[in-house]
Amino acid sequence: MTAPLLLTPGPLTTSVRTRQAMLVDWGSWDDRFNQLTASVCEQLLAIIDGAASHHCVPLQGSGTFAVEAAIGTLVPRNGKVLVLINGAYGKRLAKICEVLGRDFSTFETAEDQPTHAADVDRLLHADATITHVALIHCETSTGILNPLQPIAHVVKNHGKRLIIDAMSSFGALPIDARDVPFDALIAASGKCLEGVPGMGFVFADKRALAAAEGNCHSLAMDLFDQHAYMARTGQWRFTPPTHVVAALHEALLQYAEEGGLPVRHQRYARNCQVLLDGMASLGLRSFLPAAIQAPIIVTFHAPQDPRYQFKDFYERVKAQGFILYPGKLTQVDTFRVGCIGHVDAADMHAAVSAIAQALHAMNIEPSPSGSPA
């Protein structure tokens, strides 16, 4: 049986080459593995032109592990974080601050409204105790894209520090460390780089990281200690995800062969457009307007039909070879379809066809006018 394609925001469909890279077992102290880790970090830094200003600190675990590590390491225990929220991952970041005992405030907009730099400017003027601002670049719960560069410059102008969750954008959407000032940018192996899940990484400003000794609440998540140990020995402090690192190294080779970020972005943008056009022809409306829709994952309104049940719909689409994601909104019934991973426009056309057939089998007919079926 052929494995289904994962039209999700990660884990996602990987190439055969990436999966084959995991067939080799590595010793965690072996020089060749240490060179592999160093090469991965070097290639990751190159994507943001960050080698002069930032360290790449890898960490075992999912992206959320790396977000928690960045907050815990880089925000002093007497700091205060302004968390910008327009979806589930902004709320999760605020929860991390709460659990870690870091003082924080939140600014929340609707799930279909980006955060604006003017709001950040107003909030920083109003509260001088804020030391850090935390932003989700692409909010995966909807696919909304927040305006990173304007917000970054407002934060800098106020003399504050920026922490960016770029989990769903890094590698596909341009971020240049020379133009966008930040203390931390956080991403993971299993997203737009098309590796497998299991490793997060934080691009930490060199000066901020050097000043972070003793901040962290946790031994395992201390990025200062992780970086210091790796710089001294070339090794991970604790057992590394060796197969994940090897798969990411191979995925990065393919990333370069494809043409790097511009071509990766172009493929995802084409995937997204094919998806949007195809779903519109079925009468399925996207939740976000095009201007703020990132080409990463698209949220669609569920059909307004009593015969529609997501689980039934999901299983029917899965039987035709595609895995979708449930919605993550609290007020609106939705489902999500990812545009990223080792998939192309032909795969997206096939996915739309599978969705059409699933709806037909459920006796939910398309409504080409664009209103929900």
Image (cartoon, helix red, strand yellow):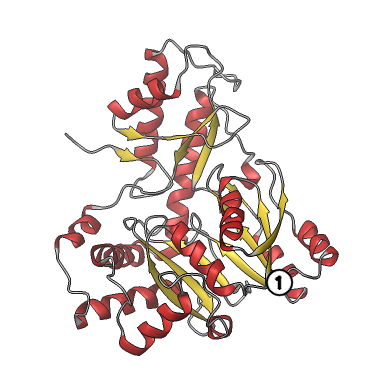
Quadrant assignment for the N terminus: top left
Please state if 150 lies on the left or on the right of 352 as rendered. Answer: right
> Residue lying furthest bottom in this view?
232
Q: Nearer the viewer, residue 294 or 28?
A: 28
Q: Residue at x 14, y 65 (%)?
A: 24
Query: Residue 372 at x, y = what percent?
Result: 58, 20
Q: Nearer the viewer, residue 235 or 349?
A: 235
**Residue that numbered label 1 is attached to:** 131
Q: Residue at x 52, y 47 (%)?
A: 140
Q: Residue at x 28, y 62 (%)?
A: 244
Residue 348: tell me if it is visible.
yes
Residue 171: tell me if it is visible.
no
Query: Residue 107 at x, y = what percent?
Result: 73, 52
Q: Is residue 26 above or below residue 230?
A: above
Q: Is residue 293 above or below residue 147?
A: above
- Badge 1 marks a residue whose secondary structure is loop
Amino acid type assigned to the residue bearing label 1 in the image: Thr
Number of numbered discs present? 1
> Residue lying furthest left in this view?
24
Query: Residue 283 at x, y = what percent?
Result: 54, 22
Please identify the quarter of the rendering in which residue 94 is found: bottom right
Please state if 40 lies on the left or on the right of 9 as rendered. Answer: left
Q: Residues within 10 Å of mark 1 (few under 14, many from 20)?
A: many
Please identify the quarter of the rendering in which residue 373 is found: top right
Query: Residue 164 at x, y = what percent?
Result: 58, 64
